Amino acid sequence: MLVSEEIENKEIAKQYKELLQISYQTLSDEDKKLIRSAFDTAVHAHRNQRRKTGEPYILHPINVAKIVAHEIGLDATSIASALLHDVVEDTEYEFGDIEKSFGVGVAKIVEGLTKISKLSKESDISLQAENFKKLLLTLNDDIRVIIIKIADRLHNMQTMDAMPEHKQLKIASETLYIYAPLAHRIGLYNIKTELEDLSFKYTEPLRYESIRNNIVESEEEQRSYIKSFSEIIKNALGEEGLEYNIKGRSKSIYSINRKMVRQNIPFEKVFDKFAIRVIYQSTHRNEKFLAWKIYSIVTDHFVPNPTRLRDWITTPKSNGYEALHITVMGPDNKWVEVQVRSERMNEIAEKGYAAHHKYKHGDHKDIGIESWLDKLQEVLENNNENPVDFVENFKLNLYAKEIFVFTPTGDIKSLPKGATALDFAFNIHTEIGMKTRGARVNGKLVPLSRTLKSGEHVEIITSESIKPTANWLDFVQTSRAKSKIKSSLNEEKKRIAEDGKESLRRKLKQLKINLNDKTTAYMLRYFNLNSSLDLFYRVGLGTIDNKQLKAFYNEYNSTFLNFFKKRIRKQKLETKKNDKEEITQRFDTLVFGKERESLKHDLANCCNPIPGDRVFGFITVNEGVKVHKKECPNALSLQSNFAYRIISAKWEDSSSDEFTALLKLSGIDNMGIVSDVTQLISNEMSVNINKISFDSDDGIFTGLISVKVKNKTILNRLVSNLLKLKGIDKVLRQ
């Protein structure tokens, strides 16, 4: 046992020396003193602890610190914090001890890391989601907390073989769901790739091994291809006096699998399994010039695909990534991606945040990671969303590809791909977003829902009288815009409800009824509402007017017994239509997707959703669509492992929420065709017609009809019935 301890101590000392030697940053004597003190404290704190693998626990924080020091390249404070990241959580040490020994900076980072690890057991919401929300909220304090947490997760993933299978699956799913996207967004591409591959290894082990073996078998082919590519251009690069290095980079196992699944092809059919990288030496001033020079040389020898050119030197990604990506027809007539980077750009791509700051130049404006963090902080502040919704919305921006659009003054703005004109308005400033009346793209008026493309000029038209509406949420993609719109809608609803409450109090007083909890409860049952806020809101809107209140008064004045007899009798008479005008949201219908389709579904037994709950649909293999609550304990697991089978869903009142559809009709002109059409739409199907126009030319008619329908199912039924009319040949939705 003594020999074993000696061996372990030697290994610990060896790992510590490696930590100092491989540090990306230049460590001063003061830095080394801080790290040594943190190391000694961590060794003492974890002296009696071991990992599941059987090795001393201290090796875990040392390895996390090595990732932080070398692969990410953070400073001495971060390295010390990584060494101490489990001390407060797992040992007798307290924050006061850390602050006294290492200062406020280290103590705050350790505190942030400890907070992430402690789950709230009191809440019935998804604990995973709550944990992720805590993780993301720490971005408000110090991004180094997140980065060290990512390093911690990476080492845990690297050493997960000793864990039981169910824990492996859970941790791997979490990693794919949030940690890999975060690493991507911060610019830690190598770590992102490793996290994805390791997660894939545990979620789909057989498929992982199959692809890995295929990659190993094709390594020789890859080396040969890179050599033949390099031979063609190296003389031309040398003649220009360029100092460069050409490397090949295999695509990750995870990304190859994603392409195989998306395109439904075998491994052999994936042609772009690797990229070629040209890394050149340059001063900061000449970087752009030399990049395009190399582009010119490469395209002199290989035919480029102009649609696949990506210039991230002129407009870097929001996480600081810079490079020139060219797709060319390489040797053997194969498409190959060529990435052109300076040594500085390559270092930023490898190290992310740390290298990004190392290479800041004087007044050089940082449009990368810090700009994103500034925007992010605004979204995170005072965010009271349900954790599942919060994480789901936040994730929208993590992996999102970027577009670049211009303001009227020529400033360039980065937005996620799929962003709309309304997203652009909120990106400029929250107040502009709130007052958006319309938008011009390239000088033409466009709807707020118009999806933007790179290179477009966008101008926002504002008005002081404009306020956000609920349908704005369907127009936006960014979490920032969604958060601000939701906040505004909630405030407006509360304001209207307050006015409605006072109005209701006055109206009930005239009817000799006091507004109290008992009366409110009766009214909620009578009007079929979920909360007093809904009641007061509808009174404030005028949806519940004097007529409905008098009807309520008549029923309220009946005896207590008769009141409930009537309610029971109405429930039993299921076939009898309620003759009272519907003025509430009954939440009696489930609709799915952006098109709000009615689909056959079952309610999940794990969470038993009821009408009005916030829900989503999950497409099962054999049982059709299962509907889960967003707070369901299985929600995160389903969303992280089977995102492609998730479909949005919500409860609606079948008597409200209509949308406009434009139908184009054509066919043979018959006497009375217009009458037949309007009769069918208005009388038989009870669909409202907004506009209608018919033209006839040589016996052929065309018609345009604008109708209001509640969902796509009704619209499809309408189209089907119109096609049955004599003379109608085609019905198309415009």
Image: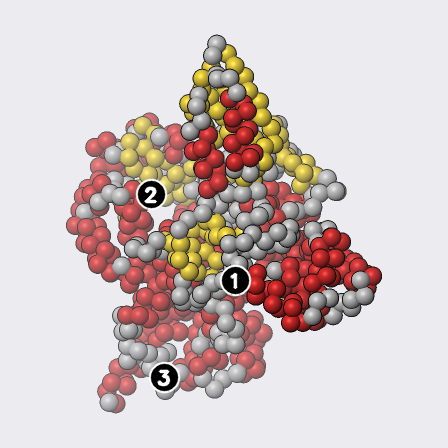
Residue 48: image location, x then y, percent: 36, 87
Q: Looking at the image, which is closer to me, 290 or 173?
A: 173
Amino acid type, residue under disc 1 in the picture: Lys
Residue 612: image location, x then y, percent: 54, 59
In the image: residue 173, left or right of residue 223: right
Mark 3 or 1, nearer chain start = 3
Classed neighbour count for the residue bearing mark 2: other residues with Cα under 10 Å, few (<14), some (14–19), many (≥20): many
- Residue drawn at the location 50% of the way across and 68% of the way down: 125
Residue pointed to by mark 3: 49
- Residue drawn at the location 52% of the way across and 37% of the way down: 685
In the image: residue 35, left or right of residue 428: left
Amino acid type, residue under disc 2 in the picture: Arg
In this rendering, the answer to whether 479 lies above or below 232 is below
- Residue drawn at the location 75% of the way across and 42% of the way down: 464
In the image: residue 187, left or right of residue 661: left
Q: Looking at the image, which is closer to me, 19 or 367?
A: 367
Mark 2 or 3, nearer chain start = 3
Looking at the image, can residue 353 be seen? no
Residue pointed to by mark 1: 572
Residue pointed to by mark 2: 277
